[in-house]
Image: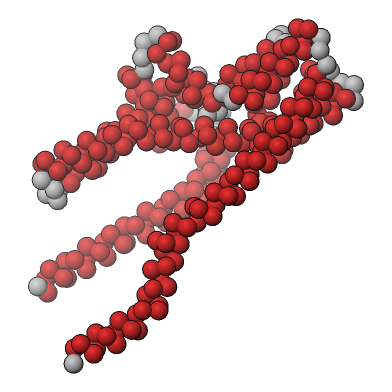
Amino acid sequence: MFAGSEMFSMGVFVLVFAGIWVAAYLIFWRAYGDDARAIARLRGLSSEGEPRALQQTPRLDFTEWVRSALPRLGALMLPQGESGTAQLRSQLAQAGLYQANAAKVFLGAKLALMGLLLLLCGLLPFLAGVVPLPWAMVLGALASAAGLLGPNVWLHSRIRRRQRELLRALPDFLDMLVLCLEGGLSLTAALPRVVGEMLQVHPTLGEEMTITQQTANLGLSAGDAFKQFAARCGLAPVRDLASVVLQSERFGASLVKTLRTHADAYRIERQQRAEEQAQKAAVKVLFPMLLFIFPAIFIVLLGPAAFQIAQLFSK
């Protein structure tokens, strides 16, 4: 019995020591990794004139290896043809991932998570003798399913968060755009001024409007650039804004009054969403109170009485 407890204490000590060592290494790597890479880069620049035999072999960075391995894994799951990846590319664009190999990296992350979680939750417990083979198969299947669905959950969460940020910033953008248009600037001349301010106040919308401005500078009209912006973000208010700009360019209608009306409507909608979230907060707080606060109150109030009753019945 004593030997078993001693082995358990030794195992806990080893685990704590290993955890502290790993945490210290990660903190040191985060704090001094950039400095070490910068110093290595300066040494490499200073030793360009030295013979190749005297130069050290560059070390392969783990993050670079992961970035190069994920697209190769994703290429195995990538459907053939543009129609199979159109929806995935649209979702990645709505999440703000515009890289050329974003779809391959996303699918590669799915495949890597499936294999890693299968190994950690299924194979290793079975080899260690913790769980029998049937339970190891069940745990491995559940872990693989979590690895398959986890990136989708993250992607949809990122899309929703990005759309909320765009909707929150859209009225301010329209107000500034209307001010510039009322000052006598054209739409293409007003966009750079508004984009410069949006990058500081609302970075997400500022980045999207930077792409829209660059698209307009390449030769497309402002309406077509806003139409592409609406396709990227997938928001109905932005589609309405693109339709207004297109109609103004096509029929010569007044753009300032229409944008002012849209800005007022979006501002009222933003206020209504804030009021809705405030009304939902009371209901959402109720469940943590029932689960965490009330049991603690009951323990404090009824604990002494429970001890007294226990002592009374023990006699």
Q: Residue at x 29, y 87 (%)?
A: 308
Location of the N terminus (image quadrant):
bottom left
Residue 9 against residue 239 in the figure, above or below: below
Q: Residue 208 appears at what percent x and percent y?
A: 64, 26
Residue at image point 50% right, 53% down: 283
**Percent coordinates x, y for residue 305 in the rendering:** 33, 84
Judged left or right of residue 14, residue 259 is right
Q: Is residue 24 left or right of residue 249?
A: left
Rendering coords of residue 31 (x, y %): 52, 51
Residue 261 appearing in the image: yes
Q: Which residue appears at 73% of the width and 16% of the height?
A: 245
Q: Quadrant of residue 21?
A: bottom left
Q: Nearer the viewer, residue 167 or 286?
A: 286
Q: Is residue 171 left or right of residue 277?
A: right
> Quadrant location of residue 228?
top right
Position in image of residue 57 (x %, y %) = 42, 33
Q: Relative to residue 159, is residue 179 drawn left or right?
A: right
Picture quarter containing residue 41?
top right
Whether 29 is drawn above or below 206: the answer is below
Say how many tags the image has. 0
Q: Quadrant of the C terminus?
A: bottom left
Residue lying farthest to the right in this orientation: 184
Q: Is residue 116 visible?
A: no
